[in-house]
Image (spheres, rainbow, N blue to C red):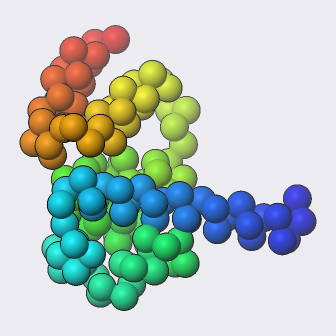
């Protein structure tokens, strides 16, 4: 892979992360300014993260995840910082992801469904 191709695929990954964050922010009915304040980052920085212009640190991702009522694991996974081949299988990740991105569910409903799902699948 050439440097240019590698750079392009890296920026695509950050753009995808930014789109995920924007989508979750909109589902939570938060303005960019509100999310930035809750996550303790600047509004311009959040804007650049959402547009895929900056690669946020793990700490920033954790703050954004907490502000959006998501697990840090979900945010790290979206950012490509976690290897999803570990203890959780692909279907487990898929179910939780589907719950998290469903626009018909409130944040509280999403958290409840994920907790229930995890309790049902804990022994498997």
In this view, 4 is above or below 69: below
Left or right: 73 in relation to 117: right
Q: Is residue 40 visible?
A: no
Q: Looking at the image, which residue sits at the far top?
A: 124
Q: Is residue 15 visible?
A: yes
In this view, 123 is above or below 108: above
In this view, 47 is above or below 120: below
- Residue at 49% x, 73% y is 51
- Residue at 60% x, 59% y is 13
In this rendering, the count of numbered labels is 0
* Pick the front one: 58 or 115: 115
Instruction: Find residue 46 and report its image quarter.
Output: bottom left
Left or right: 95 in relation to 31: right
| x then y, percent, for residue 30 | 19, 66
- Residue at 36% x, 26% y is 95
| x then y, percent, for residue 93 | 42, 31
Please identify the quadrant where the N terminus is shown.
bottom right
Instruction: Find residue 7 and report its image quarter.
Output: bottom right
């Amino acid at each position: 892979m050439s440097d240019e191709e590698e750079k392009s695929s890296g920026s695509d990954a950050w753009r995808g992360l930014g789109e995920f964050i924007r989508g979750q922010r909109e589902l939570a009915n938060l303005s960019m300014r509100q999310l930035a304040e809750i996550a303790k980052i600047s509004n311009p920085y959040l804007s650049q993260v959402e547009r895929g212009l900056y690669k946020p640190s793990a700490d920033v991702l954790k703050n954004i995840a907490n502000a959006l009522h998501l697990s840090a694991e979900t945010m790290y996974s979206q950012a490509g910082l976690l290897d999803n081949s570990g203890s959780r299988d692909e279907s487990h990740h898929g179910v939780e992801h589907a719950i998290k991105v469903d626009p018909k569910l409130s944040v509280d409903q999403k958290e409840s469904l994920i907790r229930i799902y995890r309790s049902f699948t804990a022994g498997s």
